[in-house]
Amino acid sequence: MKMLEVRDLNVRYGVVRAVLDASLHVDEGELVVVVGANGAGKSSLLRAVAGLNKHRGDIELAGSPVAHLRAEQRVKRGLSLVPEGRHIFGRMSVLENLQVAHWGATTDLGSEISDAFARFPRLEERKHQTAATLSGGEQQMLALSRALIRKPRLLMLDEPSMGLAPKIVAQMFEIISEINAAGTSVLLIEQNARMALSIAHRGYLMETGTLSGGGDARVMLDDERLHEAYFGKSPGAAS
């Protein structure tokens, strides 16, 4: 089953077309990554799927059309987004952030918070600390935990590695991979193409609003165009 199917999606900001006839899909249990440079339209794509941008085109979640639904209705259908910049509630504590995110959910709050703290013990140590005082890595842990607390069917992440130390980036990608392995479908937007493709099943390349690819992520790692654009050399070039 396709957990997400997007067909001919268009996003426009005034006269600027940020996303042009984009189509992609994420199968149930799959981890799919969209890579591309800054300004390629990746965030606009994700925000449209989440219902945060005006858009034209078809969007289906687990076979049901959702393009006509508001963002909060899409969340109730099982979609969660970790936005670029995290957007946590800085004046609230870690615990309060998780409680607010769970509002209206049918899952057990205590159990979900226990799962979040088991995944990120550092958050439990800081559960009464205001979110604004957390480090960048800790804030990303909180943003991810907040998105997971409703047990989404599809988790979407926008640049989760941005601004993080290399050690934390590696940990974050490992956790994303574990979340996917446990059964959550994932759509990942990421500039760190090499690391993202290394954990994904399939990948797309986005350039100036247009999507291409959709094939095996390991094959994309050897794609000459991708290497020239993001790795600085072709795959066959000498180191």
Image (cartoon, rainbow, N blue to C red):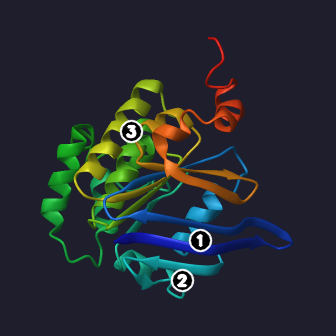
**Position above or below: 121 against 88:** above
Q: CA distance from mark 2 to mark 3?
A: 29 Å
Label 3 environment density (alpha carbons within 10 Å; few <14, some 14–19, many ≥20)? some
Q: CA distance from mark 1 to mark 2?
A: 9 Å
Instruction: Please report the residue visible at 36 percent of the width from the left and 60 percent of the height from the top.
Output: 147
Q: CA distance from mark 1 to mark 3?
A: 24 Å
Residue 97 in view of the camera: no
Instruction: Please report the residue visible at 62 percent of the width from the left and 21 percent of the height from the top.
Output: 236
- The spot of residue 68 in percent (x, y) is 54, 88
Asked whether, in this view, residue 72 is left or right of residue 209, the answer is: left
Instruction: Please report the residue visible at 47 percent of the width from the left and 34 percent of the height from the top.
Output: 195
Task: Look at the numbered disc 3 and give the secondary structure of its residue.
Answer: helix
Q: Mark 3 or mark 2, which is nearer the start of the sequence?
A: 2
Query: Please, what is the three-letter code of the amino acid marked with disc 2?
Result: Ala
| CB atoms of marks 2 and 3 within 8 Å | no
Label 2 environment density (alpha carbons within 10 Å; few <14, some 14–19, many ≥20)? many
- Quadrant where the C terminus sits is top right
Asked whether, in this view, residue 13 is left or right of residue 164, the answer is: right
Task: Look at the numbered disc 1 and give the secondary structure of its residue.
Answer: helix
Q: Mark 3 or mark 1, which is nearer the start of the sequence?
A: 1
- The residue to which callout 1 is attached is 48
- The residue to which callout 3 is attached is 173
- The spot of residue 96 in percent (x, y) is 30, 60
